[in-house]
Image: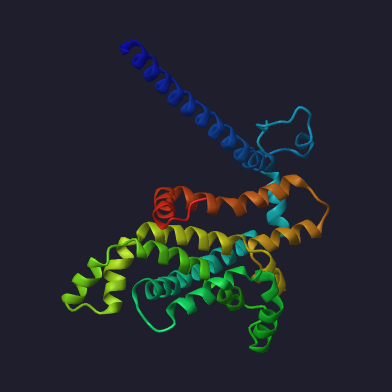
Amino acid sequence: MKAAAGHTLKNAVYKKHAGNIISFVLLMAGSVIMLIPIFWMLSTAFKEQGQIWNVPPVWIPVPIILDNFRDVFEILPVDRLFCNSVLVSVITTIIQLITSCMGAYAFARLNFKGKNVIFLFFMASMMIPRYILTIPLFLIFNQLRLGNTMTALILPGCVSAFSVFLLRQFIEELPQEFDEAATIDGASRWKILFRIIIPLAKPGLMTLIIFAFMNVWNDFFWPLVIINDTEKMTLQVGMAFYMGAKKVEWGPIMALASCCSVPIMMLYLFAQKSFMAGITAGGVKG
């Protein structure tokens, strides 16, 4: 009996270790597959044109050149486009953060007539493809004389149903005893929101910030439609403008793509722990 029990225990330990090894290998393989395009983009940005199509491929360029970046900066006002993208993304993210906090708190903590119905319609708006709203928004902004302005880039992203849903899920996980204790101490709803809920919801807020900033930063279609002045273009639209201005040269294009990707990478690396904590706590896995 002891021998059989020992054999069973060894098999269980072996299966556990084997499962861990398989999971590790699969995760590493998936990570490599996802990182290859990013590495290739960064590598190509510093290559000579003749090295891009070499077989076998040149992964690490020798020599490392900056000509691709110089070519892009000569044709496009990249610094101006970069500042436009940062300005629009930061302002939109801040406003969306404020509106989402208030909306999520209302749906998670307040009781009012028709709350569930309103929330249902609010969530149903997520099923409407954003491209369907492009023409109505375009007409509205032009009638308001806001076409071809930075305001037109910012306003559509100031409210997000997904962000409200994400924060609502996170706030509902917080014990209501905090609210009750603050109410007994005489705190108003606004004070409870800004002094208690928001500090406790930091992981959820960081998740929202990353999603909001990433969506605005990567947006291409709406800025392409509403902006026709080069000085007001975002970096993503500038990339399309560059590709249409001259023949396709992948070195400069990858240099411009690298400029577009760096802020998102830095933001994620900076807020990685809070982002993962917010995803787990908010129950929005997968």
The picture quadrant where one finds residue 181 is bottom left
- Kindly identify the residue that appears in the image at 75 percent across and 58 percent down: 242
Task: Indicate whether 45 appears above or below 100.
Answer: above
Q: What colour scheme was applied to this rendering of the protein?
A: rainbow
Task: Indicate whether 108 appears above or below 115.
Answer: above
- Kindly identify the residue that appears in the image at 42 percent across and 51 percent down: 280
Residue sitting farthest toward the front: 1
275 or 124, which is in the foreground?
124
Task: Indicate whether 64 appears above or below 282.
Answer: above
222 or 175, which is in the foreground?
175
How many labels sit on residues? 0
The picture quadrant where one finds residue 77 is bottom right
Residue 168 in view in this figure: yes
245 or 212, which is in the foreground?
212
Residue sitting farthest toward the left: 185
The picture quadrant where one finds residue 179 is bottom left
The image position of residue 73, as x and y in percent, is 68, 55
Q: Is residue 206 left or right of residue 191?
A: right
- Kindly identify the residue that appears in the image at 69 percent across and 63 percent down: 237
Q: Is residue 16 left or right of residue 2?
A: right
88 or 198, which is in the foreground?
198
Residue 227 in view in this figure: no
The image position of residue 255, as x and y in percent, is 67, 48
Q: Quadrant of the N terminus?
A: top left
Residue sitting farthest toward the top: 3
The image position of residue 191, as x and y in percent, is 27, 75
Task: Indicate whether 157 appears above or below 112.
Answer: above
The image position of residue 11, as x and y in percent, is 43, 19
